Image (tube, rainbow, N blue to C red):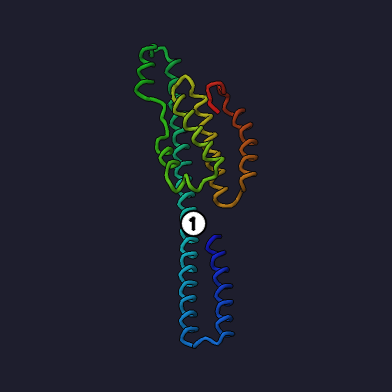
Amino acid sequence: MGYTFILILLSLISIGFLILLKKKKQQSETLSFVSTLLATLFGVLLAVNLSNRENLKKEKADTIKLLKSAKNIIDNTFDYSKGLGTYINTIEKDSSYNANLVSKVKLDNPIPYPDLMENIISNEVVSKNISEYSHNFIFSSLINLRKIANYNSIDTYKYLLKELEFIIDLEIKYQENIVDKEELEKIYNKEKERLEKEFPHDSKIIVD
């Protein structure tokens, strides 16, 4: 936007300056030199403007690619956590497993935390381009996930993962210009109600 304004302004100044020189009947050499100088400046600014636009397009494409990777990480973390929870429930009901053995299985198989997801969101390109709403939401979710990554709160953990996966999916749509910022928040609030019904959890241990 800034470079476009400068280009327009420079064009107007150039036209006005050339008209002024012509009216004053300046020497053709001077007129030619000024014309060449202004044309060069115009060309440089135009090239910079086009380069910046291409960089912005590339950044947006890279942001979408990284967000899709983040979504896959969350999805895999959810599946693994769900599998662990199911396995623990099974052996807890198995009389051949005593409490000590179950505790050892839990200790050897901790609930996974999406560290790679944290690295992606901290990436300069992603943090610079995603919406403020999603940025704040994602970091808040990561704080909660790290705090409750244990078997005692696995239902709440699974809920947070699904909630996080959904907000990332919404942010991808925002980056692709499918939804705007206002729609992003409205769609999330509607989906939140469905997730709360599908994944009953203890909201008291979640930090807003």
Compared across the picture, whether 96 is left or right of 59 comes to left
Q: Give the residue at x 46% y 79%.
A: 36
* Amino acid beneath label 1: Leu
- Residue at far front of view: 24
Image quadrant of residue 103? Answer: top left
The percent coordinates of residue 114 (x first, y second) are: 42, 34
Image quadrant of residue 84? Answer: top left
Image quadrant of residue 132? Answer: top right
The image quadrant where one finds the C terminus is top right
Which residue is more in the foreground, 165 or 78?
165
Q: Give the residue at x 55% y 39%.
A: 167
Q: Residues within 10 Å of mark 1 (few under 14, many from 20)?
A: few
The percent coordinates of residue 118 (x first, y second) are: 43, 37
The percent coordinates of residue 188 (x first, y second) are: 61, 38
Q: Give the residue at x 44% y 36%.
A: 76
The percent coordinates of residue 20 (x first, y second) are: 58, 80
Q: Give the residue at x 35% y 17%.
A: 104
Label 1's element?
helix
Which residue is more in the foreground, 166 or 119?
119
The residue where tag 1 is placed is 56
The image quadrant where one finds the N terminus is bottom right
Compared across the picture, whether 96 is left or right of 179 comes to left
